[in-house]
Amino acid sequence: MIIVEILHFTLAVFLLLNLGAGMWRVLRGPTAADRMMAAQLFGTTAVATLLLLAQATGTSAVRDIALMFALLAAISAVAFVRLTWPEEENKDDLA
Amino acid sequence: MTLLDYLAATLLLAGAVFFLAGTLGLLRFPDVYTRLHALTKADNVGLGLTVAGLAVQAESWQVVGKLVLIWMLVLLAGASVAHLIARGALHKGIRPWTP
Amino acid sequence: MVKLAFDGLVVLLLLWLAWQTLACADLFKAILQFISFSLVMALAWVRLDALDIALAEAAIGAGITGALLLAALARLRASLDGNLSGDGASPDGREVLPVRGLILAGVALATAGLGYAVLSLPETAPGLSQQIEARLGDSGVGSRVTAVLLNFRGYDTLLEMVVLMLALVSVKTFSSTRHAGAAPQDVLQVLSRVVVLPLILVTAYFLWAGTDGHGGAFQAGSVLGAAGVLLLLSGWRLPSPHTGVPLRALIAAGPGLFVIVALVTLLLQGTLLTYPPAYAGSLILLLEIAATFSIGATLAMLFLGGLPGDEDRP
C-alpha cells in the first residue's frame, strides 16, 4: 500500500521537524528543567517515529527499538533530578 | 483504501496534531510548569492516538499488545518524570507564572 | 521521495547536534545534546537497516551514557565547587586566525577526501557476507551478527569484555562511591520498582532474541545495567553480604568464562576460540548469559563510581 507508506513517512518527517523545533527550548530554556523536559520530548517523539517506521517498512523488529526507548526514557531525567539538579540553578550559561 | 485505512489515517493525523500542540506549548508557554503540563499531556495523548492508528493496521494481536505496552511504559515514565521535575522546580523556588 | 526527506532531515539533525555538543560552553546543555545525538543516531541506524547497532545505540548511548555523564557532571561540580568557567582565557581572535584557517583547511581536505572515497565505492559491496553465509550453519546460531560477534570474531568480543572490566577497575581506583543521599520521593520508588520488572523481562527477551534475531549480550546487558542504575538512583544499595565476593564474581563472570573457553579450545584443538559445531549453539548461549550479567553489573557499578563499600576514600 504505497499511499499508507507515504503517509507514515510524511508523519515521521513531521515528527522529526517537531523534534528540531524542540531543540530551541534546549538552547533557550532559562532553567535546567526546561532543557531536561525538551529531552523528554525527544524520547517520546523518537518512539512515535520508530513505530511509524516499523509499520511503513514492514520490519517488526524496529518495534523492539521503540520498546527499548520507552523503557529507558526516564533514566536520564531521573539521574538529572536526583544528582545534577540539587547543586546548581544559579549557574548561567556562557554560550 | 478501505474504511479501516481511513480510520487509521485519521487517528495518525490526530496524533500528529497533538504532537504539534505539545511542541507549541513547549515553545510558547510562559513558565516551567505550564510547559511541563503541555508537553507531558499532549505528547502522551499524541503517542496514544498514533499507537491506536497503528494498532488498527497491525498484522496480529501480539503486535497490538506490544504497541499498547510501549504506550503504557511511555505514559508511566512521562507522568513520573513530570512529577519529579515539577516538584524539584518547586523546591528550587521557581515561581509559577502569574498573568 | 519522502524517504529522502526523512533521511536528509536525520543527517541535518545529526550534524547540528554534533556541532552543538562540541561547541556548547555549558556542560549540562552539551550532555543533553549528546543524548539527543545518540537518539537521532539510533534513528539513522534503523534507516541503514542495522538493527542490532540501533538497539545498542538506544540502550547505551541514549540511556546509560546519559545517566553516567550526568552523574559525572554532578561530581565535577561538587569537586570544583561550582567553578566551572575555567581560568584559561580564550585567545584573541587576531592571533589565532591563521591557526584556525589552517585547521579549517585541513578538515575540509579530509572531508573532501572521505567524500570522494565513499562516492567511489561500488554500488553493492558484498564484503565478507558470502563467506559468512556459507559457514552460518556451522556457527550454531541463526543471526549473522551474533555469529560474527560470538563465534567468527569471538576474540574481539573477549577483548571488549576485558576492556569493560578494566574501565571499572580504573574508575574504582581513583573514585569513591557516593552516599545514598536523601530518601527519594514515593513517586521515584514506585517508578523504579514498576519499571525494573519489565526491564528484567526485556533483558531475557533480547538475550534470547539475539540467537536468531536482533539482540544479543551487549543489548541485554545494557538493559540490565539500566535497571541497576534506576535502582541505584532510587536509593537502593546491594545488601552487605552480597557486595564482596559474589559481586566481584558476577563482574568477572563474563570475561572469565570467555577466557576459560578460549584456553580450553586452545588446549583441545590448538586454535583459539574455534567451537566444535555440535556444541557451538550451547556454548554461545552460555557465553552470552555470562556476558549479560557481567555487562549489567559492570555498567551499574560504573554509575556508582566503584564497588559498594568504597565510600569516601580520599
Image: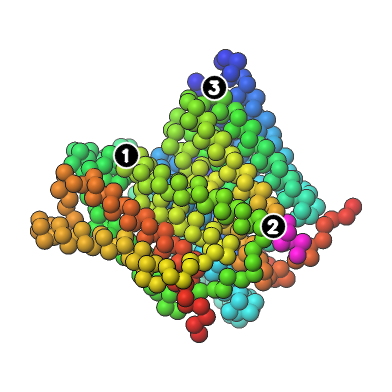
Specify the amino acid type for callout 1: Asp
Output the chain of dot 1: C
Q: Which mark is residue B85?
A: 2
Q: Which residue is mark 3?
A: A3
Q: At numbered mark 1, what does the secondary structure look like: helix, strand or loop?
A: loop
Residue sitting nearer the eye, C92 or B47:
B47
**Extent of the magenta region:** B85-91
Which residue is labeled 1 in the image? C212
| Vertical comparison of C136 with B94: above or below | above
Image x and y of residue C84, in percent: 62, 75
| Label 2, label 1: how far apart the Cα atoms are | 41 Å
* Front label number (1 vs 3): 1
Residue C186 falls left or right of residue C139: right
Secondary structure beneath label 2: helix
Instruction: Give the farthest residue toward the bottom.
Output: C314
Q: What x and y, as percent, mark residue B85?
A: 69, 57
Up the image or down, C304 lies above or below A56; here it is below
Q: Residue at x 62, y 37 (%)?
A: B47
